[in-house]
Image (tube, rainbow, N blue to C red):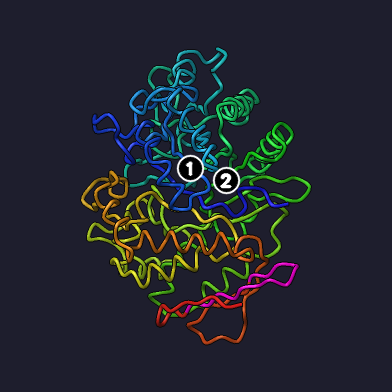
């Protein structure tokens, strides 16, 4: 029997920008509580909360200072538990970010580590006497960070970080660090969490002579984490991998039948194809990607298909020619930063609703668990003049939501109807997948079928952006 997460509609709810209940300019859990019925009516099955832990907010909360404390700007732990309980009562599941590649440099572990090499936290992080190690490893935030190493004058050594220097990487060769992760996960499951998005998961381990991404040790750790959760919670707690890697490598994050790893993986290879096909008017790329990705998955594994989220529209999986095309088609005047384009779904597609509706119909008809970004249900705007990724992390304009709800022809109400169609069409939830061959070059068609004979064929023509379902 399929688990809840294999075909759930996820909704990324960026708490800080979702709903401000107390008027202090900072979104909070009381505001989330007020809008849970709105999410249920939209058709959401699971809410994904990016970090709301105590944090200096150097990186939008992904720099965590304490994994067991709620940042008081969002509310209290009681507020969080009340939201989780209400979501469950409405039939929605809860996923939170498990950010374990790094912490904030304000975390007590890092403070203790830098002050005592031989203390209990001395090897919780990756330290070295010089900055020569792991040469050739890419600097992910190269627009702001010149190196993956930063010198710490307190300890008199360099520490390793794959992102901002304020985010030192944890040392996963230390068994104590691995146990900390298990304990943190157990803590939040006890609070009502049903799943974890594993942030930046390819970067956990370091080995000389490699690019320090997706190493065998990382997969071995994920198998241990999955085993712990499955044995403790009966397979009901979901792991979702954020691994922006090529398709064949991405598939490895599901693990194997003998050693399963993640239940879901974000479908980065498909994401760029979704934006390319309306411009090329050719289905060849997306047809090839879907043939590769939607076959021979381990039992219980599924893709999380998405358009946008709180990060850049990443281009790092594309060759140079396709990157140049994407920049020409979609980039704002500021161009690309750190490997992506900071635009939301509506603005990046010029609010062309025919295109957006057709692509959305495709997204929810494919196998897996579609993931929606907050505010994109009203095609809310962005602000490319803001630094870094702030341009796609704006407050929800609730007056626009109210107008959309009152307009029977709005994208919001169309999306509600679309998700109802998906929810009441069993082959779109659990059917197998087969590309329909022999279609014109601009047409992508596939059939979803159940063992009882029920099936649905979905077709989209990227030349006209017409789409259809048929039995």
In the picture shown, does residue 337 fall above or below 175? below
Residue with the mark numbered 1:
48
Find residue 324 and report its image quarter.
Answer: bottom left
Where is residue 47 drawn, in percent x and y? 48, 43
Name the residue at 40% across, 64% down. Answer: 414
Q: Do the residues labelled 1 and 2 touch (CB within 8 Å)?
A: yes
Q: Classify 10 Å Cα crowding around label 2: few (below 14), some (14-19), many (20 and above).
A: many
259 vs 433, nearest the viewer? 433
Q: Nearer the viewer, mark 1 or mark 2?
A: 1
Q: What SS does tag 1 mark?
A: strand
Where's the C terminus, which quadrant?
Answer: bottom right
Name the residue at 64% across, 46% down. Answer: 262
Left or right for 145, reference 422? left
Residue with the mark numbered 2:
240
Where is residue 159 drawn, in percent x and y? 46, 29
Query: Which residues fall within the magenta stretch?
Result: 448-460
Specify whether residue 451 is painted magenta. Answer: yes
456 vs 406, nearest the viewer? 406
**How far is mark 1 from mark 2, CA to CA?**
10 Å
Left or right for 122, reference 223? left
58 vs 118, nearest the viewer? 58
Name the residue at 53% across, 48% down. Answer: 45
Q: Compare marks 1 and 2 and give the one earlier in the sequence.
A: 1
Where is residue 66 drawn, in percent x and y? 46, 23
Name the residue at 53% across, 37% down. Answer: 89
As drawn, the label of residue 123 is none
The furthest residue to the right: 258
In the picture shown, does residue 471 fall above or below 416? below
């Amino acid at each position: 029997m399929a688990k809840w997460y294999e075909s759930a509609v996820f909704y990324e709810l960026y708490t800080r920008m979702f709903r401000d209940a107390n008027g202090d300019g900072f979104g909070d859990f009381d505001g989330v509580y007020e809008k849970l019925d709105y999410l249920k009516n939209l058709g959401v099955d699971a809410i994904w909360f990016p970090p709301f832990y105590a944090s200096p907010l150097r990186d939008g909360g992904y720099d965590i200072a304490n994994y067991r404390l709620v940042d008081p700007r969002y509310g209290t732990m009681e507020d969080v538990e009340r939201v989780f309980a209400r979501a469950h009562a409405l039939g929605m599941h809860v996923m939170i970010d498990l950010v374990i590649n790094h912490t904030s440099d304000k975390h007590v572990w890092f403070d203790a580590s830098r002050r005592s090499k031989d203390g209990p936290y001395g090897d919780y992080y990756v330290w070295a006497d010089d900055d020569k190690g792991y040469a050739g490893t890419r600097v992910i935030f190269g627009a702001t960070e010149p190196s993956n190493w930063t010198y710490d004058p307190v300890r008199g050594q360099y520490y390793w970080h794959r992102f901002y220097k304020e985010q030192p990487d944890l040392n996963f060769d230390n068994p104590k660090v691995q146990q900390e992760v298990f304990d943190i996960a157990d803590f939040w499951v006890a609070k009502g969490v049903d799943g974890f998005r594993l942030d930046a998961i390819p970067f956990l381990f370091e080995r000389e002579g490699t690019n320090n991404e997706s190493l065998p040790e990382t997969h071995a750790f994920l198998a241990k984490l999955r085993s712990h959760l499955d044995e403790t919670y009966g397979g009901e707690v979901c792991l979702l991998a954020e691994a922006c890697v090529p398709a064949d490598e991405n598939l490895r994050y599901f693990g194997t039948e003998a050693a399963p790893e993640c239940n879901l993986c974000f479908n980065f290879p498909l994401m760029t194809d979704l934006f390319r096909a309306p411009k090329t008017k050719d289905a060849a790329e997306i047809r090839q990607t879907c043939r590769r990705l939607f076959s021979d998955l381990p039992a219980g594994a599924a893709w999380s298909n998405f358009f946008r989220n709180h990060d850049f529209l990443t281009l790092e999986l594309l060759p140079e020619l396709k990157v140049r095309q994407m920049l020409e088609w979609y980039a704002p005047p500021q161009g690309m930063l750190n490997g992506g384009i900071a635009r939301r779904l509506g603005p990046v597609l010029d609010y062309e609703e025919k295109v957006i509706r057709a692509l959305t119909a495709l997204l929810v008809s494919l196998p897996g668990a579609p993931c929606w970004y907050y505010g994109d249900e009203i095609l809310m705007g962005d602000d490319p003049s803001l630094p870094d990724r702030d341009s796609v992390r704006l407050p929800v304009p609730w007056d626009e939501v109210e107008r959309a709800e009152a307009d029977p022809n709005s994208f919001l109400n169309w999306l509600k109807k679309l998700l109802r169609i998906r929810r009441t069409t069993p082959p779109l939830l659990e059917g197998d997948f087969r590309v329909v061959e022999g279609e014109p070059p601009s047409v992508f068609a596939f059939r979803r079928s159940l063992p009882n004979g029920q099936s649905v064929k979905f077709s989209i023509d990227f030349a006209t952006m017409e789409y259809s379902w048929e039995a």
